[in-house]
Amino acid sequence: MEKNSIFQHNTYQTLASGFYKGTTSWKDVMNYGNDGLATLDGASGEVTIIDGVAYLCDAKGQIREVKEYETMPYVALVELHETESVLLENMSSKVFYAKLLKIFKKNSLYAVKVRGSFKHMEVANKLENNEGPYDQVLARQVHYSQDNVSGILLGIASPEHLINFYGPTYHLHFMSDDLKFGGHVDHFEVESVIVDYAQIDEIHQDYAGWDPDFQKINLI
């Protein structure tokens, strides 16, 4: 039986340490998984990968498909062969997260893909061509919200020992069904959703170790 796997180019920590240079192209990584998360060169915007198609959500709230030649400083893609599902209704994101943590094994990495309707969704998208400390990049993000929206929320749930690789416990992006609203998830209110989740048992980690600029950063 094939294992559920994740491929990652660089890590959440390399991004958080200020390495924003695109060191892999979408074409180079697109066959490593069907769903995932990324950002473009310069930590520009938020990329959500759904069923093999990468969508960029920019700071103007506009959405378009990522071109094959565009580069990324960070991307994570999952290839899932076996998933489980649970129906969740009428709850805040805080309660949603807590319910999933009760289901997930303490020290395992999980991928989640959530389909359904949300009473409220708040997202944030980074500006283009960022420089400087990552906390300042995040402080300059543009925030958007929408009520009564249907779509897909997907991403990674990290155990404590893998947070430096994959980010704080939940790293999630959202894309509306009409492809007009999306980005990095801040907060939401669930109406009714189906949560498909899978334990990741195989990790493929790629680094831009060949790049001189990568070797200059101080990883924190």
Image: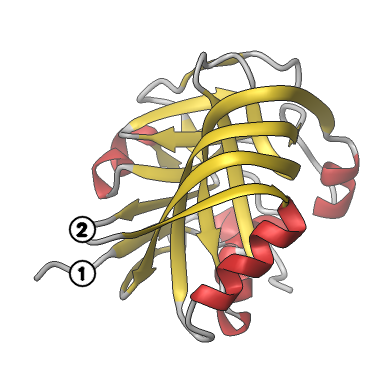
Left or right? Give the position of 173 relative to 37: right
At horizontal 31% and vertical 75% (from top left) the residue drawn is 201
Left or right? Give the position of 152 relative to 147: left
Circles 1 and 2: CB atoms closer than 8 Å: yes
Q: N-terminal of the two: label 1 or label 2?
A: 1
* Quarter of the rendering occupied by the C terminus: bottom right
At horizontal 27% and vertical 49% (from top left) the residue drawn is 32
Residue at the spot of label 2 = 81
Residue at the spot of label 1 = 3
The amino acid sitting under disc 1 is Lys
In this picture the colour scheme is: secondary structure
At horizontal 23% and vertical 61% (from top left) the residue drawn is 82
Q: x and y percent of residue 176 in the render?
A: 56, 24
At horizontal 45% and vertical 67% (from top left) the residue drawn is 110
Q: In this view, does 142 lie above or below 81?
A: above
Disc sitting over residue 129 in the figure: none
Left or right? Give the position of 57 relative to 155: right
* Quarter of the rendering occupied by the N terminus: bottom left
| Residue extending furthest toward the left | 1
